Image (spheres, grey):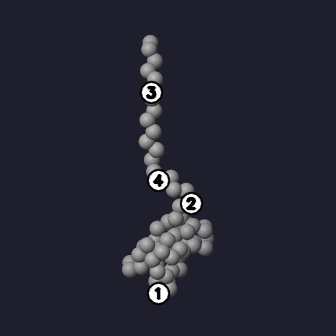
Amino acid sequence: MASCPECDNILDVDVDEVETGDVIVCEECGTEYEVVAIDPLELARMDEDAYDEEDDEEFAEEEEEG
Ligand SMILES: [Zn+2]
């Protein structure tokens, strides 16, 4: 049985009734999880903000002359 990583609530997922791509919502904290695999059951958290990408902006460092 899968549990919510956010609040440890038991996610009552019936593997017979869900399929990959389905979205499970934690009743306790409202976090959404997408079913990415059935056997074994695997859930992927759906983040509202996808800030995974690291901004690798180059900063032009100004060197101060002393
Ligand atoms: Zn939860």
Q: Amino acid at mark 1?
A: Asp
Q: CA distance from mark 1 to mark 3?
A: 58 Å
Q: Residue at x 45, y 39 (%)?
A: 57
Q: CA distance from mark 3 to mark 4?
A: 25 Å
Q: Is residue 52 visible?
A: yes
Q: Earlier in the sequence, mark 1 or mark 4?
A: 1
Residue under label 4: 52
Work out whether 39 lies above or below 62: below
Q: Which mark is residue 32?
A: none
**Tag 4, which secondary structure?**
loop
Specify whether 58 is left or right of 27.
left
Specify whether 63 is left or right of 29.
left
Residue 22: x %, y % from top left: 51, 76
Graded by Cα atoms within 10 Å as few (under 14), some (14 to 19) or many (20 or more), the crowding at tag 1 reads few
Total numbered labels placed on residues in the image: 4
Front residue of 2 and 36: 36
Residue under label 1: 16
Q: Which mark is residue 61?
A: 3
Q: Is residue 10 visible?
A: no
Q: Earlier in the sequence, mark 2 or mark 3?
A: 2
Give the foreground label among 1 and 2.
2
